[in-house]
Image (tube, helix red, strand yellow):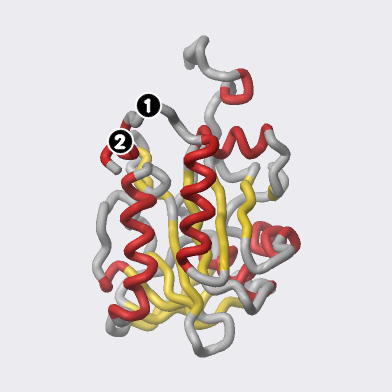
Amino acid sequence: MLLNPETPPFLQKAPHVIDDGVTKFKVTLKFSTAPSTAEVVGLEKWRAILWRLGLIGEYPNEKIGYGNLSQRLTAPKNAFVITGTQTGERPHLKREHYTRVLACDLTRNSVEAQGPIAPSSESLTHFAIYESQPQIQAVFHVHHPELWARLIEENAPAIPEGVPYGTREMAEAAARIIQSDEGLFVMKGHQDGIIAYGPTPEVAGKALLRLYRRLGPRGGEGPAGQL
């Protein structure tokens, strides 16, 4: 693979094998009606913004979606509504593209969901974050190669490179790294992966916007230029 000589040194590395969208845990899905509008409207607002910035989308060659958003439900404990698996290519989602995760078992590597679609392949990580801090109400997982690389360069809070995404190990590492009810971290072993979390979707979303404005592409190229 030929690398652009103008690319910063920390970006000049061969890409990892992309295995996003591969569910690495056992899912028990009880098919039911979609989450209510009230349960998804806050997430969908931010998802549309993040999609336009390219932080959610689909890898064109592999046809694999990336990025997922969730918000805590009032009951049962640590339950949440989350975007369905492989929905990244859609600029807007309907209620039928969201589902509820009712319970997770990290020791058994299993997820219990209810809705019209299987949950995101990162559901275990979302669950571990909610379990770690009861004040956290929203978790946004996005992808961006430049932001990812620059966060690593800055020694931002990070999950070690050897921890694969969508696994019990990733979930446990995410829970250990959380120190407050809002913030973000980079996933060194998950190509391009960044997670933001907060007490509301607004807090998590604005953290990503600040990051994008500080470290993201310049010149308005691509989807971001439409904002």
Residue 79: percent from the left, percent from the top? 52, 81
- Element under disc 1: loop
Q: Residue at x 50, y 89 (%)?
A: 75
The amino acid marked with disc number 2 is: Gly
**Image position of 154 (left or right of 101):** right
Residue 143: percent from the left, percent from the top? 48, 45
- Residue 10 position (above or below residue 20): above
Which residue is denoted by mark 1 in the rendering?
A: 219
Look at the numbered discs 2 and 1 and tell me whether their residues touch, using CB distance below 8 Å. Answer: yes
Residue 128: percent from the left, percent from the top? 63, 69
Residue 195: percent from the left, percent from the top? 56, 54
Q: Residue at x 47, y 54 (%)?
A: 22
Let me know if residue 28 appears in the view: no
Which residue is denoted by mark 2 in the rendering?
A: 225
Q: Residue at x 53, y 74 (%)?
A: 111
Nearest the eye: 224 or 186:
224
The amino acid marked with disc number 1 is: Gly
